[in-house]
Image (cartoon, rainbow, N blue to C red):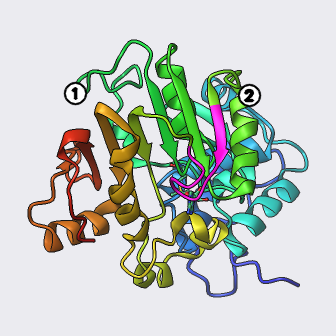
Amino acid sequence: MKNKPWVRRKNSKKTSSYPKDGATVHAWIIFLAERLAESGLSFENGLQEPYQEAEYLTAFAFSISLELLDSSPNLRAPVDAHARMEAIMEQRIVRRIPAAYITREAFFAGHRFMVDQRVLIPRSLIENIFDAEGRFDAWVMLPERPLFLDLCTGSGCLAIALALAYPNARVHATDDSLQALEVARINIANFGLSDRVMLFEADLFRGVPSVRYDMIVTNPPYVSRTTMASLPEEYRHEPTMALDGGVTGLDFVGRILRQAGDYLTPGGVLICEVGDEGEEQIREVWPDFPGEWIWFHFGGSGVFCLERSLFPEKVVI
Ligand SMILES: C[S@@+](CC[C@H](N)C(=O)[O-])C[C@H]1O[C@@H](n2cnc3c(N)ncnc32)[C@H](O)[C@@H]1O
């Protein structure tokens, strides 16, 4: 029999056993939350903590909505709850599959996206710059009908969030992975945005239309090789090419800084995510880096913005 780490073993200190027949959904949530918490999982690319993830996965396992769960605290679990929960635990605890890939959905900027292992699970820090309407109004003046480029689009989450927040905008979205582009295409169609969000297969700027953009937004791969080697198992279900940024992690960021200026309008702006490690490195090796680090309410950001006129002659990363 396959190893089942959630089954209570003799002398184990685990606190709760399987809920009994006829137990409430809530009892199963507690049970799953405890199993998740004690199994050494990473929640970084998911809902961040065991209870929330248990609630979400239990609702999925029992085919009930989170709304129903909220409004009916004494809801009974289905008769085959045990088997359903084992299937979830085998995926999440034994195989360490992130919750989003189990449910094939992820939420970003208040929208629901279809995801699977062809794309990174949406969690870009750029989401933290959006205002309540999902726009950049507080700090960037964009024209009435902006043209955006979302470089390295993955699931299409940033491109779609921008198209929804700016109803007059057009968005070009690119990726070098045909598989990612397939998922992005599904999401764009699901949101009814096929007339305003166009996809291009491109190796960074090689394959991008020769036009000028009012804003380029990008969350490129930026994990350094050292960090890649120590990532929790959950990340290994995500496409390596979505994470691997080369030895220092800054290979793509350097290329973007060398080329993005040629694709921006005179007042155009680049918004680029590089993560905490990337920000630290850039601050260290490039003291007069012309980009502005965006400050988030929870501290440092790992995201910079750079206006067209400030693009450097020489890129030192
Ligand atoms: C960090 S993921 C970001 C995905 C999405 N924008 C998001 O925020 O969830 C980086 C993406 O870059 C893509 N990518 C990797 N190498 C690329 C390249 N040379 N040119 C364009 N895209 C590339 C990957 O396929 C992946 O979808």
Tell me which residue sits at (15%, 68%) in the image: 286
Residue linked to disc 1 = 139
Magenta segment: 198-208
Residue 101 badge: none
Cα separation between marks 2 and 1: 30 Å
Mark 2: secondary structure: helix
Query: Is residue 116 shown above or below 235?
Result: above
Label 1: few (<14), some (14–19) or many (≥20) C-alpha neighbours in 10 Å: few
Mark 1: secondary structure: loop
- Image quarter of the N terminus: bottom right
Residue 89 shows up from this direction? yes
The amino acid type, in three-letter code, at marker 2 is Asn
Image position, residue 295 (x, y; %) = 19, 45
Tell me which residue sits at (73%, 55%) in the image: 178
Is 211 situated left or right of 248 in this image? Answer: right
The mark tally for this picture is 2
Q: Earlier in the sequence, mark 2 or mark 1?
A: 1
